[in-house]
Image (cartoon, rainbow, N blue to C red):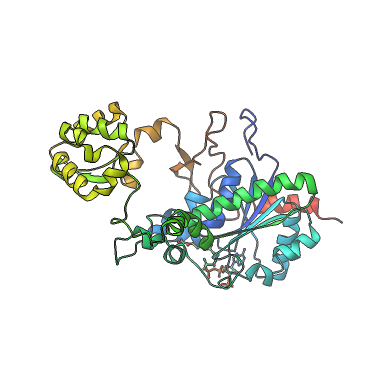
């Protein structure tokens, strides 16, 4: 709960029970927790396996489970399932992201719980929404391949996944958006509802602009890097010493400004480059000319001049470098959190400011079952005699 001196958070008083692992379900719970909900994560005896993932998964638990409480309930037993169902009855929202059918086999699905607790809002996070693929298991990578994204990320012949689990994270966000809408709706109807969020549908939503491009032109959009950008200058250039810089000059004014900054008056004066449409038509030649000029500029000199002139630009930054990013440090987006082993780590907050404040970290990352006693003792008060 918030310390008494902190302002009230928007979801204070909303109680959430989550049966989740990996990324998608936990993200949904964390968004709600950060916004003030009391989020109770149900873990199996021994804890969520996500706590011990190696490699790329090592940061999952810490990244997506802050501000939650942890209870251990073994839902593989009848007694555990009965306790979990009673606990659900004390909550406004239940979240889950296990394989299709698992929660129904435990009698912890929406149909079963809503018959007892009609005000319950219940979010399922799956690979696919109802339809021909609904029983398939899915990982983020699976739907990036099936959902048009890996093809577009290219290059030709070598589909690549995006650098993070975009569909998992977006799936959790859309789950949370569904919860907010359903809470509002419940104020009027008195009833909860089932929210279904799915990886594949998320990915297709991300690919929608490319599908629309096809619908309007009749041509299949080619993958990066050969795809024709909407803008003529929108690329990564190699500067002096091999350093790379992204430069995007999307308006005619920005193109002329860029020509001035890099001292290329002949490009600014060329009538064949006078509009974005003309420049896009000769993009490869234009990029070649710009590249030949830019290779003589140094990033450290050019970047401040681009900034002063109002040209969007970006160095290519690695995640480890972000830990020291001065903007991130100063804007309060990276804050310390006490970890479940008693240490401290810096975590990234929700990309959201509300009334000038970033929803922050209010409690240490929970140890496995840290709140079992507290929560189940509270449950006894709720269970009718
Ligand atoms: C991701 C999965 C394919 C992972 O499969 P699995 O690891 O085999 O998990 P499953 O969901 O099949 O099963 C979970 C098991 O945990 C057990 N379980 C879970 N909670 C409990 C508790 N509290 N008590 C006892 N047992 C428990 C449950 O009974 C199951 O046991 P058994 O029955 O004995 O097995 C699937 O969970 C899934 O389809 N989820 C929905 C889509 C999703 O979230 N995908 C994103 C994944 S992450 C990702 O994409 C990425 O990182 O990239």
> Which residue is at the front of the view, 16 or 219?
219
Q: Residue at x 54, y 43 (%)?
A: 364
Q: Nearer the viewer, residue 378 or 9?
A: 9
Tell whether 384 sits left or right of 265: right
Q: Quadrant of residue 163?
A: bottom left
Task: Using the image, determine if residue 201 lies above or below residue 339.
Answer: below
Residue 311 lies, with reference to residue 282, above or below; the image says above
Q: Position of residue 88 (x, y in %)?
A: 72, 56
Q: Give residue 20's position: percent from left, percent from top.
A: 58, 59
Q: Give the image location of residue 78, x and y in percent.
A: 72, 70
Residue 31, how many percent across, how many down? 57, 46
Determine the residue positioned at 33% across, 39% down.
250
Residue that sits furthest to the front in the current view: 271
User: Which part of the image, by quadrant, shows the N terminus?
Assistant: top right
Quarter of the rendered structure image containing ligand 1:
bottom right
> Residue at coordinates 18% horizontally, 41% vertically from top-left?
290
- The quadrant of the image that shows the C terminus is bottom right
In the figure, is residue 114 to the left or right of 226? right
Left or right? Give the position of 241 relative to 201: left
Left or right of 77, for residue 127: left
């Amino acid at each position: 709960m918030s310390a008494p001196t902190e302002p009230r958070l928007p979801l204070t008083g909303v109680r959430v029970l989550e049966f989740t692992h990996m990324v998608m379900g936990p993200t949904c719970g964390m968004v709600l927790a950060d916004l003030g909900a009391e989020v109770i994560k149900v873990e199996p005896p021994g804890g969520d396996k996500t706590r011990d993932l190696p490699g790329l998964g090592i940061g999952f638990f810490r990244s997506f489970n802050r501000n939650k409480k942890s209870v251990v309930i073994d839902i593989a037993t009848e007694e555990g399932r009965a306790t979990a169902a009673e606990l659900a009855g004390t909550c406004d929202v239940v979240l889950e992201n296990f394989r299709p059918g698992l929660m129904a086999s435990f009698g912890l699905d929406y149909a079963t719980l809503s018959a007892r607790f009609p005000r319950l809002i219940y979010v399922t996070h799956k690979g696919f929404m109802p339809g021909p693929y609904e029983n398939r298991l899915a990982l983020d990578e699976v739907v990036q391949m099936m959902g048009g994204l890996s093809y577009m990320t290219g290059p030709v012949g070598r589909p690549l996944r995006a650098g993070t689990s975009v569909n998992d994270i977006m799936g959790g966000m859309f789950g949370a958006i569904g919860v907010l809408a359903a809470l509002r709706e419940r104020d009027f109807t008195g009833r909860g509802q089932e929210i279904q969020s799915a990886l594949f549908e998320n990915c297709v939503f991300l690919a929608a602009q490319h599908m629309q491009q096809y619908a309007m032109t009749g041509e299949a959009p080619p993958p990066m890097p050969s795809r024709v950008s909407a803008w003529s200058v929108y690329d990564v250039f190699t500067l002096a010493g091999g350093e790379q810089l992204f430069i995007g000059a999307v308006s005619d004014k920005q193109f002329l400004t860029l020509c001035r900054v890099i001292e290329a008056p002949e490009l600014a004066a060329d009538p064949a480059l006078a509009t974005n449409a003309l420049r896009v038509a000769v993009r490869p030649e234009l990029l070649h000319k710009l590249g030949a000029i830019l290779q003589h500029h140094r990033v450290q000199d050019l970047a401040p001049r681009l900034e002063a002139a109002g040209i969007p630009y970006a160095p290519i930054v690695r995640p480890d470098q972000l830990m020291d990013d001065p903007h991130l440090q100063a804007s309060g987006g990276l804050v310390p959190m006490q970890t479940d082993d008693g240490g401290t780590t810096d975590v990234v907050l929700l990309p959201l400011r509300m009334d000038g404040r970033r929803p922050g970290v209010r409690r240490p990352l929970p140890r496995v079952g840290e709140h079992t006693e507290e929560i189940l003792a509270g449950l006894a008060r709720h269970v009718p005699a």
